[in-house]
Amino acid sequence: MKRLHEIMNIKSNLRNQGFDHTFVMERENIRCLEYGVVISPEEFEIIEIHYCNTLNNDDKCIIYGIELTSYGVKGVLISHYQCYLAGMSIQLWHKFAGILRTMFISGTCRPVNNHLKIVRFHNNPVQQLT
């Protein structure tokens, strides 16, 4: 229950920042649920990431703040940590793996309210951490 409360708080904070659409991950793309639009990896940027860690290794998730670069539309994508093992296109995997690599290998992310947060703006390197 604590994890669900944490996820809802993160999603609410992102919504307050204008991330008001919902995206889901598919094999080769992401999809905007409000419009049913399929978005290729080249059409979006990962702006913000929250890594929700719990005591149970099977219960981890990553919450992404995503912006569609051509439209300025922002939204949230929530993925289970294990989805990266389930099979996705190399292009989509590369998009998400690149930012996760930055987050974990660089050692530049910090805990915020029991989860890790990294903020990144478009193709620039990490500019702000809270």
Image (tube, rainbow, N blue to C red):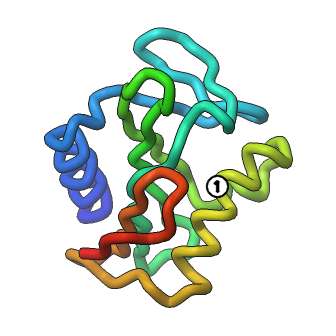
Outermost residue, front side = 124
Which picture quadrant has residue 34? Answer: top left
Picture layout, residue 4 above or below residue 33: below
In this view of the protein, which residue sits in the foreground, 2 or 62? 62
Where residue 90 appears, x then y in whole percent? 85, 48
In this view of the protein, which residue sits in the foreground, 44 or 50? 44
Q: Quadrant of the C terminus?
A: bottom left
Where residue 116 appears, x then y in whole percent? 37, 75
In this view of the protein, which residue sits in the foreground, 78 or 92? 92
Picture layout, residue 117 above or below residue 108: above
Q: Give the amino acid at mark 1.
A: Phe
Outermost residue, left side = 16
Residue drawn 54% across the image and 55% down it: 123
Q: Name the residue tied to disc 1.
A: 96
Residue drawn 49% across the image and 32% down it: 69
Residue drawn 31% across the image and 62% down it: 3
Residue drawn 55% across the image and 36% down it: 44
Q: How many marks?
A: 1
Outermost residue, bottom side = 107
In this view of the protein, which residue sits in the foreground, 24 or 123? 123
Where residue 124 appears, x then y in whole percent? 50, 61
Q: Is residue 120 left or right of residue 25?
A: left
Which picture quadrant has residue 102? Answer: bottom right
SS for dot 1: helix
Q: Is residue 50 left or right of residue 93?
A: left
Badge 1: residue crowd in 10 Å (few <14, some 14–19, many ≥20): some
Outermost residue, top side = 35
Q: Quadrant of the N terminus?
A: bottom left
Where residue 93 appears, x then y in whole percent? 75, 52
